[in-house]
Every structure is written in structure tokens, then in C-alpha cells.
């Protein structure tokens, strides 16, 4: 009550002397509504129930296999993963008083996903998300943070975040992954394959959580796929071109060179319009090479679906279902659930093409050949090749990447 009294001035000091004042203060400083609860979720040792109001100053904990979704008054959403401790240090939002905005959170252990709301949009400096190794600031964002032992790991699904500590500030854009190893060590971008199993698992679980869009237009359901195993949401146009889940990188990098491609037994007779409609199938990506001092050899499989219009424009998405342990480390499925959009074109002869792609970001170059394939009125096949090479900057330790990726898509038309 002392902190509240100090913040509310003389009026609060008077109210604090009565039981009525305690009720008033509690209602006035309620921060969030518990939108959903799974398993054992507690605040001050008391079980938390769906529909309950949580006060500013509260610390919530989640048990094994548990999860909680908090809906804040400005439209912001926070999803807490299992085995998490999360403190609402100071939260205040009044529609008509932006000068009083506060959204200060502290992730003490575990993992959390944050989808920003109106407060972060109108008062960016009033938002801070703290971990033991950094303070994160945002702008219209959907991001995930996971603490594994001491390091904090980041996944940006939408927007942009800035991780600041004693060593400086590093900005991460949509699709990137980062690591802050200590409070005095600068944050660095890393590929998804460098994530520890615990962080990858948390990213997958939280990325799949259903969240409502806040006032800032934050992400939602697609994040479940796009963040999938933390590997998701890999925007190739950012540092995460390398961290797009490596295997998914090739597909997205060629601007989805991936599309479906096809060669088959039935040939068209009327041009691109003969291929109009929805197609679907499976794909395989084979990966070999080394990254950050670790060998990477194996494959990923998944499914794709695409719609072709009468002009031959192909728009679709692919979803990785599983990857071998040689790619993802001990988990074997770090990128499971990753969903990536793609585009391509098909001409009158049934030839499918995706543009060649090359981009260098933070010392790492991702290059993909112009994917090729053949379409018929009943089936599709498609393939392309990608390489990822260079030395990541900033980085400490082993920072080189040298990898090759080959992709093959097959499918049918209904």
C-alpha cells in the first residue's frame, strides 16, 4: 500500500487508512484479466482461475504442462509457458491519460509471449520487458522470450524489438532469433538450429497459442505455424534469413521458389488457366554442412498447399512437419509447425519457376537458384537448391556457416 499511496498522493494516503481503501486500490490497479488457464497457475500461492483479475505487482507462476493467457486493459496479451515466473512490476493504462502509461514486466524464469497493445503503440518508452540479461523495448510487436539457465533467447514473430543491457542495444526484426548470454554481453542474432532444446520447445508451444490482436495489430494464429518450433516466422529479409529454421530458409528464400511444381502425364492445352485451382502435396528438404561449429546433416519433411489463378500466379504455403535429429539437435523437431508463404508462376506450357534469390545480412549470405518444375492438369513437381554461408556478425566463438539445402516438392490437383 505504501507504493500505491506514494503514487496516488494525499487522496490515496487517506483511503489507505480504511478497508474500503484497500478494495478501491485493488480495483484501480487491476492490470489484466485471466483469459485462459491450463494446469497449475498461481499468484501468491493461490490458484488462478479463468476470468480472474490480476493486480499490478503480482507474480504469477506456472507448473509443468501449464499455461496462462493474460489480456491487459490496452489490448495487450501475454502468454506464459510452463515452469514460468512472471512479475507484473507496474502496469497502468487509462484511455484518456497516456502520460500515466506504464507496462513494466519482469520474466524471472521460463518463457513468455507478448503481443503488444495500444499502450506500446502510443507510449513506447512506457513499455519494458525485463529478463536477467536485458531489458526489451518494442514497437507494435509479437515476440517470445525464453530463459534457459542464464541466457535469454528471443524470437520475433512480428514488428521489432530492441534488447538493451550494459553492453549496448541490438535491434531484432520480424523473423529473427537472438541470444543474450549475460547482462554484460551484447545480444547476438543466431539461427534456429543454435537454439537449445528448451528454448525451441517453448517457442513452439507459445507460437501455437491463440492470441487476440492488440491495438498494435499484433500477430495471432499464424504465429503458431510461423513460430512453430521457434524456427518459424523466419523472414528471409532480416538477420533471421539464417535463422528461419535453416531448412525452411530455402523455401522462403526463393520467394518461395518453392511453390509446387510439376511434371506429370497429362499436358495442358489452353495455357496457364488450365492449372487454375488449388493443389497440395508433400516436400522434402535435405540439409548438409556446418553452422556455428556444429555439423548439420539430415532432412525435413512436410506438406504444402497452393492456389493458382487463371494468369498462372501461384500463391501458397508450406508447413514443416518433422526434421531429423541431425538438423535440430536432440529435439528432432525444432522446426515442426513452421509455416512459410511462397509464390511462383506457371506458364502456358506448364513450366513452373521461382525467382533466384541472394541476400547478405549480418555477414551471412543466403542464395537460392531459380526453382524449376513442371505442372500438368493432374500433378506438380518442383525443386531448387540453396546455400547459406559466411561468418555471422556480431558473434562470439565459432561464427561460420557453410550449408547446402535441396528441396523437392510433389503433389496433385483435385
Image (cartoon, rainbow, N blue to C red):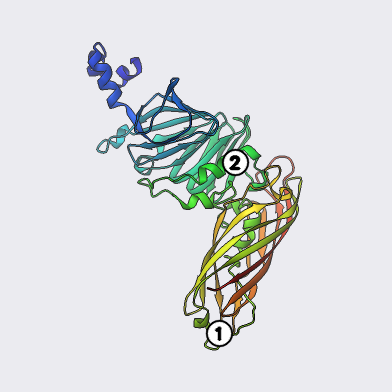
Q: Position of residue 128 (x, y in %)?
A: 45, 34
Q: Residue 201 shows which numbered tag?
A: 2
For the question of whether residue 370 can be seen, the reply is: no
Q: Which residue is mark 1?
A: 348
What element does badge 2 sit on? helix
Contact between marks 1 and 2 (CB within 8 A): the answer is no
* Residue depicted at x 76% and y 45%: 293
Residue 202: which quarter of the image?
top right
Q: Is residue 24 left or right of residue 216?
A: left
* Residue depicted at x 47% and y 34%: 129
Q: Of marks 1 and 2, which one's residue comes earlier in the chain? A: 2
Q: Residue 339 shows which numbered tag?
A: none
What element does badge 1 sit on? loop
Q: Residue furthest bottom?
A: 269
Residue 247: which quarter of the image?
bottom right
Q: Label 2 neighbourhood size at 10 Å, few (<14), some (14-19), many (20+)?
A: many
Q: Position of residue 242 (x, y in %)?
A: 64, 53
Q: Residue furthest top?
A: 17
Q: CA distance from mark 1 to mark 2?
A: 45 Å
184 or 263, nearer to the observer:
263
From this view, report whether residue 219 is shown above or below residue 32: below
Amino acid at each position: 500500500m505504501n507504493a500505491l499511496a506514494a503514487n496516488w498522493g494525499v487522496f490515496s494516503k487517506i483511503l489507505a487508512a480504511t478497508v474500503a481503501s484497500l478494495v478501491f486500490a485493488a480495483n484501480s490497479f487491476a492490470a489484466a484479466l485471466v483469459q485462459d488457464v491450463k494446469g497449475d497457475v498461481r499468484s501468491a500461492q493461490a490458484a488462478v482461475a479463468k476470468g480472474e483479475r490480476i493486480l499490478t505487482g503480482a507474480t504469477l507462476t506456472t507448473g509443468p504442462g501449464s499455461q496462462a493467457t493474460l489480456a491487459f486493459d490496452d489490448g495487450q496479451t501475454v502468454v506464459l509457458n510452463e515452469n514460468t515466473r512472471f512479475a507484473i512490476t507496474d502496469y497502468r493504462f487509462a484511455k484518456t491519460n497516456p502520460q500515466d502509461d506504464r507496462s513494466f514486466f519482469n520474466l524471472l524464469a521460463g518463457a513468455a509471449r507478448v503481443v503488444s497493445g495500444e499502450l506500446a503503440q502510443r507510449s513506447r518508452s512506457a513499455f519494458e520487458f525485463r529478463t536477467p540479461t536485458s531489458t526489451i523495448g518494442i514497437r507494435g510487436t509479437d515476440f517470445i522470450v525464453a530463459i534457459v539457465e542464464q541466457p535469454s533467447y528471443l524470437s520475433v514473430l512480428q514488428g521489432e524489438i530492441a534488447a538493451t543491457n550494459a553492453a549496448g542495444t541490438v535491434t531484432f526484426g520480424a523473423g529473427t532469433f537472438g541470444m543474450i548470454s549475460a547482462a554484460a554481453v551484447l545480444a547476438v542474432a543466431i539461427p534456429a538450429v543454435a537454439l537449445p532444446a528448451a528454448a525451441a520447445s517453448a517457442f513452439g508451444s507459445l507460437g501455437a497459442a491463440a492470441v487476440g490482436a492488440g491495438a498494435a495489430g499484433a500477430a495471432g494464429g499464424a504465429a503458431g505455424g510461423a513460430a512453430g518450433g521457434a524456427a518459424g516466422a523466419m523472414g528471409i529479409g532480416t538477420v533471421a534469413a539464417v535463422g528461419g529454421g535453416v531448412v525452411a530458409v530455402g523455401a522462403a528464400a526463393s520467394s518461395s521458389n518453392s511453390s509446387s511444381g510439376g511434371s506429370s502425364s497429362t499436358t495442358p492445352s489452353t495455357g496457364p488457366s488450365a492449372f487454375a485451382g488449388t493443389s497440395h502435396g508433400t516436400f522434402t528438404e535435405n540439409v548438409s554442412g556446418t553452422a556455428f561449429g556444429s555439423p548439420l546433416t539430415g532432412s525435413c519433411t512436410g506438406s504444402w498447399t497452393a492456389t493458382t489463378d487463371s494468369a498462372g500466379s501461384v500463391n501458397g504455403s508450406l508447413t514443416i512437419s518433422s526434421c531429423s535429429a541431425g538438423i535440430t539437435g536432440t529435439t528432432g523437431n525444432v522446426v515442426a509447425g513452421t509455416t512459410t508463404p511462397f509464390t511462383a508462376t506457371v506458364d502456358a506450357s506448364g513450366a513452373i519457376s521461382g525467382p533466384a534469390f541472394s541476400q547478405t545480412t549480418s555477414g551471412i549470405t543466403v542464395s537460392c537458384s531459380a526453382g524449376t518444375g513442371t505442372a500438368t492438369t493432374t500433378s506438380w513437381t518442383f525443386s531448387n537448391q540453396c546455400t547459406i554461408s559466411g561468418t555471422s556478425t556480431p558473434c562470439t566463438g565459432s561464427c561460420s556457416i557453410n550449408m547446402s539445402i535441396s528441396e523437392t516438392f510433389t503433389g496433385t490437383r483435385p
